[in-house]
Amino acid sequence: MERYFIDLMLEHMHRGNRIGHTFNKQAWTDMLTVFNAKFGSQYDKDVLKSRYTNLWKQFNDVKNLLSQSGFSWDESREMIVADDYVWDAYLKVHPDARPYRTKTVLNFNDLCFIYGYTTADGRYSRSSHDIDFDDEIQAANMGDAMGSSAPSHNERPRTEWTASMDQYFVELLLDQIIKGNKTENTFNKQAWTDMLSSFNAKFGPQHGKRVLRHRYKKLLKYCSEMKVILKQNGFSWDEPQQMIVGDNDVWDAYIKVHPQARAYRMKTLPNYNDLVLIFGDATEDGVDTNLHQAKDHEVDISGIKTGEGKGSQTLASSDRTRTYWTPPMDRYLIDLLLDQVHRGNKLGQTFISQAWIDMVASFNVKFQSLHDKDVLKNRYKHLRRMYNDIKSLLENNGFSWDETREMITAEDHVWDAYTKVNCILFLI
């Protein structure tokens, strides 16, 4: 329900139906009508407006925390992270922030679209050259992000990217390519020095090489992910609008499988064709194109029992670390598995050796981890067991699949009778 509500708000922002810090009357009416039709409910506007306010508070809480020294955003786990001593010191003064020490904040990047960027008249005006929130998050660690908030005394200033800055940076990159200063997927040291000198001469001396390199990687990510989408049937590049276009049913079907692609439904990239020339084959080689979000943070039960894997979050145990699987990790693994199935690399109930090698390499690049094949194979087996258990349940009378809530449903008496005999299913 929350995910659907957020999608409705994003759609109305795209339509320009936001006034000040909320939506116009017709937008609320339209969202309520569609929402009630989707979930068979009879809510009034106050219910959606209350949820809007609660999400806004959550957004501000997270933003405030990330503005403090020592806190940063973990994109893989979708939560705020910091050393224990940082949390302990902060919570002594701000005890209300305690839930965020372990809280997974799903949909946070979308909340940044909704609550973080409005112009004076309240209309949604965020495009590819505006501030990217994931850039702001990087600022917590790097000090180079594209945020607009004022730096504290111990932080480096942040760069707010504009259309003219992007255009000039792209021209510098193209010029260095013409000069033969691009090697494989990046530029030589002198090229970065020259580009930085020219960039600072035009926009001010406060920028460092890391700022340009970070923007370079960000543009590579945009170009790569757009290129993936444009390879799918039904999508095309609209040069006048400088964005990807497709029929609503095409977008809906694609986003259902690749939720991260939602941002590109309304994203413009004025320099896309130039970026294709700049990055070339780099957009085909292992670049992060994870085009999200499951419903709950789930710990791998099998991993806890066996103590296997090398996780992004570990517990001290006997002799091996344990992998804590997050919704984005599961989503990305499933995308990798689907890709290998489409390539014909699945034999029987498993995949060929090269498929596992490729998946491990992509997974480790995505999550900056050092997992081996056994970790992914264990999770694959766990997901297969979960699938078989659910399939078995759905074969029994009284059980059905609720696509909206993505869960098994049945009357209480049906559950009670079944779980008396099969209580192990509660472990899923």
Image (cartoon, helix red, strand yellow):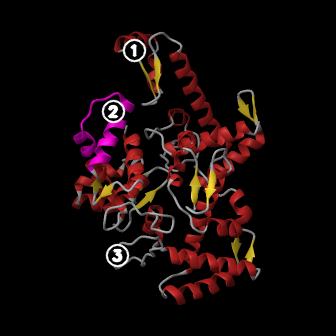
Q: Which residues are magenta?
A: 25-51
Q: Which residue is found at the position 35% from the left and 66% from the top?
A: 119
Q: Give left or right: position of 416 versus 351.
A: left
Q: Is residue 249 above or below residue 348?
A: below
Q: Give left or right: position of 122 versus 216.
A: left
Q: Which residue is found at the position 66% from the left and 51% from the top?
A: 362
Amino acid at pointer 1: Trp
Residue at the spot of label 2: 36
| CA–CA distance in space, label 2 to label 1 | 27 Å
Q: Which numbered disc, 3 or 2, marks the residue that appears first in the sequence?
A: 2
- Residue 220 picture location, percent across and down: 62, 64
Q: Give left or right: position of 357 versus 223.
A: right
Q: Which numbered disc, 1 or 3, marks the residue that appears first in the sequence?
A: 3
Residue at the spot of label 3: 150
Specify whether residue 417 is in view: yes
| Label 3 Cα crowd, 10 Å radius (few <14 / some 14-19 / many 20+) | few
The answer to which of 274 and 419 lies nearer the viewer is: 274
Element at label 2? helix
Mark nearest the camera among 1 and 3 is: 3
Residue at the spot of label 1: 415
Q: Which residue is found at the position 74% from the left and 62% from the top?
A: 281
- Residue 399 picture location, percent across and down: 46, 15
Amino acid at pointer 3: Ala
